[in-house]
Image (cartoon, rainbow, N blue to C red):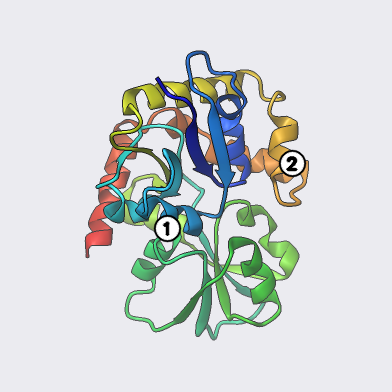
Amino acid sequence: MYVALSLAISPCPNDTFVFHALVHGLVPGAPPVDVTYADVDITNTAAEKGEYDLVKVSYAALPWLLDKYELLPCGGALGRGCGPLVVTREGNSNVKTVAIPGERTTAYLLFRQWAEGRSFETEVVPFHEIMPGVAAGQFDAGLVIHEARFTYQRHGLTALQDLGEWWEAETGLPIPLGAILARRGVVDPAAAAEWIRASVRHAWDNPEASRDYVLSHAQEMERDVVDQHIALYVNEYTADLGDDGHAAVKALLRAQAH
């Protein structure tokens, strides 16, 4: 019997929307949850140390984590038309320095594949600092994820490349972004998957129930941006990866191995 499970997710609307019911004790039979909110570069590192029972990480980090964790087939972020963007200031085509959200993120793996043969200096920067840093001229370009798809123009930035479009053209598969892992020997993965699926169903059936919770963690996002974010990243693959989802994960891991 579980006393309480430690859970680490991002404060982004897709995660808080999906996990609202589980975090707030609204999933019958699920244990209490102690939740931590952190950027994915932090959760990737924490998972390598085995710090959480359930944790959201980048799919690209899986090779370093599967000795301690098992991949769950639900709760993550995977889809089409939702990939990372390489953004620059208007008119800047001379890119030498790039701000990235983490070296073991899916975004950076895709960037390396797309940029093969070209030379860039990269710097890991907290996600929320990337666009302001590019706009201020600290970096020539930035690798952005999540709601930045809807807001980068407000910073006077332009999209140099949509890496999701590039990936889909190359593979024909959806893009695997964030995965949910369960710690081996601590969490029953089948039970955890059922709790998370129940939380997803509750979110879809009661979209207003999580509204205040989602907005409170949404880092100054307007309601319409939050809604677009959830609509894009919480989809059929959130409930179950399915054949396409599993194929996409395998393709990404093959790319990681090269």
Residue neighbourhood size for the residue with mark 2, other residues' Cα within 10 Å, grouped as few (<14), some (14–19), many (≥20): few
Q: List x then y, in percent, for residue 44.
A: 42, 55
Please give left or right for residue 97 compared with residue 111 in the image: right
Q: List x then y, in percent, for residue 9.
A: 53, 43
Residue at x-position 47% and y-position 78%: 122
Please give left or right for residue 251 compared with residue 39 in the image: left
Residue 177 appears in the picture as rendered: no
The residue closer to the viewer here, 43 or 61, is 43
Q: In which quarter of the image is the C terminus?
A: bottom left
Residue at x-position 55% and y-position 35%: 34
Q: Is residue 55 above or below residue 159?
A: above
Report which quarter residue 237 is drawn in.
top left
Q: Earlier in the sequence, mark 2 or mark 1?
A: 1
* Mark 2 vs mark 1, CA separation in Å: 25 Å
Q: Nearer the viewer, mark 2 or mark 1?
A: 1
Q: In which quarter of the image is the N terminus?
A: top left
The residue closer to the viewer here, 246 or 67, is 67
Q: In this view, does 235 lie above or below 89?
A: above
Q: List x then y, in percent, for residue 250.
A: 25, 47
Q: Determine which of the numbered discs, if any, sits on residue 45 in the image.
A: 1
Q: In this view, does 146 lie above or below 214?
A: below
Q: What element carries label 1?
A: helix
Residue at x-position 61% and y-position 18%: 205
Q: List x then y, in percent, for residue 77.
A: 47, 42
Residue at x-position 52% and y-position 13%: 28
Q: In this view, does 146 lie above or below 256?
A: above
Q: Which residue lies furthest to the top in this view?
A: 28
Q: What element carries label 2?
A: helix
Q: Which amino acid does label 1 sit on?
A: Thr
Q: What residue type is labelled 2?
A: Ser
Question: Which residue, given by chain and number where applicable, does mark 2 sit on?
Answer: 216
